[in-house]
Image (cartoon, helix red, strand yellow):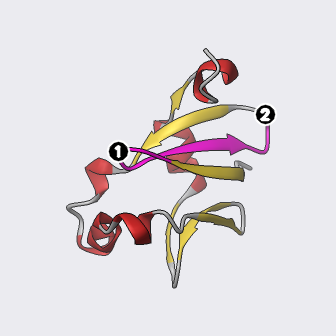
């Protein structure tokens, strides 16, 4: 089972995601922003409210992306690069 352990909002509508099994990746939300359910995330303040709930990334009140989608489409990066240390 794939689960998100933590999420950090990055510039340009991207998310730095740590998965419970130890991998880390950057997920680009921009391709989703034209879909009706995700248009509300065009507001940077609303996008910035991303959190982890039930093992995936969610936004209040009830918007989420399946953890399997996040994992399959996230760009994997070495931890030092993803954290800004590289």
Membership of 11 in magenta stretch:
yes
| Residue at image coords 48%, 63% | 48
Q: Is residue 82 above or below residue 54?
A: above
Element type at marker 1?
loop
Q: Are marks 2 and 1 in contact (CB under 8 Å)?
A: no
The residues colored magenta run 10-21
Residue 43: give its label: none
| Residue at image coords 78%, 34% | 22
Image quadrant holding the C terminus, namely top right
- Which percent across, then down, holds residue 8? 60, 49
Q: Is residue 7 shown left or right of residue 12?
A: right
Determine the residue located farthest toward the top in the rendered image. Answer: 86
- Which percent across, then down, holds residue 58? 56, 68
Q: Is residue 79 shown left or right of residue 70?
A: right
Residue 12: give its label: 1
Q: CA distance from mark 2 to mark 1?
A: 24 Å
Membership of 50 in magenta stretch:
no
Q: Residues within 10 Å of mark 2 (few under 14, many from 20)?
A: few
- Which percent across, then down, holds residue 70? 53, 47
Q: Earlier in the sequence, mark 2 or mark 1?
A: 1
Residue 22: give its label: 2
| Residue at image coords 70%, 48% | 2
- Which percent across, then down, holds residue 17? 62, 44
Determine the residue located farthest toward the bottom in the rendered image. Answer: 61
> Which quadrant of the figure has residue 51?
bottom right
How many numbered dots are placed on residues in this image?
2
Q: Is residue 36 shown left or right of residue 58?
A: left
Q: Is residue 46 above or below residue 34?
A: below
């Amino acid at each position: 089972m794939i689960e998100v352990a933590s999420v950090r909002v990055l510039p340009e509508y991207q998310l730095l995601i740590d998965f419970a099994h130890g991998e880390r990746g950057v997920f680009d939300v921009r391709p989703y922003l034209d879909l009706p359910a995700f248009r509300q995330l065009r507001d940077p303040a609303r996008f910035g409210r991303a959190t982890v709930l039930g093992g995936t990334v969610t936004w209040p009140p009830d918007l989420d992306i399946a953890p399997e989608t996040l994992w399959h489409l996230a760009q994997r990066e070495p931890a030092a690069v993803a954290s800004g240390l590289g």
